[in-house]
Structures are given as structure tokens and as C-alpha cells.
Amino acid sequence: MKKVFALEDLDCAHCAKKMEEGIAGLEGVTRVSVNFLAQKMTLEADDDRFDAVVREAVALCRKIEPDCRILVK
């Protein structure tokens, strides 16, 4: 499954890169891209683990950039 998420209050490109690298290491992730300028994250992961991957990505992003929010609908 592939989905694009809006990001809110991502303050620096370095943090975006750290988030991208961390999420890429999560089990089930096939591809991830965090775009600082567009304030978007594109995530591709296994269908059966997609919701769990999103939860793990949200938690990881909070650790790296506490003010940043992934807008999950």
C-alpha cells in the first residue's frame, strides 16, 4: 500500500532526513520519502502491516522532531 501524509511543523531538512532514514528501517516498509519543502511523507509498506507501520512512524517522528505531526486521517 502507498499513501501520502501531510506533515505539520517540520522545522528542518536535517530532521526530515533523520525521520526518513528511521522509518526506512521499520519492518514492512518498502519505500519512504520525507519532503521537507512540501511538508509531505510518502510511505509504501506491506498491506498487512500498514497501520502498524504508520503508528511506529508517528512515534519515531515524535522522538526526532517533537513539534512535527503526521496528519493521519
Image: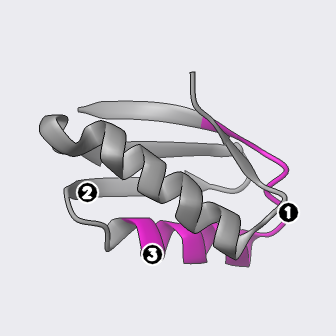
Q: What residue span does the magenta drawing correspond to? A: 6-23
User: Which secondary structure dominates the residues rendered in magenta?
Assistant: helix
Q: Closer to the camera, 68 or 20?
A: 68
Q: Residues within 10 Å of mark 3 (few under 14, many from 20)?
A: some
Callout 3: helix, strand or loop? helix
Type of amino acid at the residue the image marks with label 2 = Val
Q: Amino acid at mark 1?
A: Asp
Q: Which residue is mark 3?
A: 21
Quadrant location, the N terminus: top left
Residue shown at 55% from the left, 67% from the top: 60
Residue visible at 31% across and 67% down in the picture:
26
Q: Note whether 64 is above or below 6 in the view shown.
A: below
- Mark number, residue 11: 1
Residue underneath mark 2: 29
> N-terminal of the two: label 1 or label 3?
1
Q: Position of residue 10 (x, y in %)?
A: 79, 56
- C-alpha span from label 2 to label 3: 11 Å
| Residue 47 lies in quadrant | top left
Badge 1 marks a residue whose secondary structure is loop
The image quarter containing residue 15 is bottom right
Which of the two discs, 2 and 1, labels the residue nearer the N terminus?
1
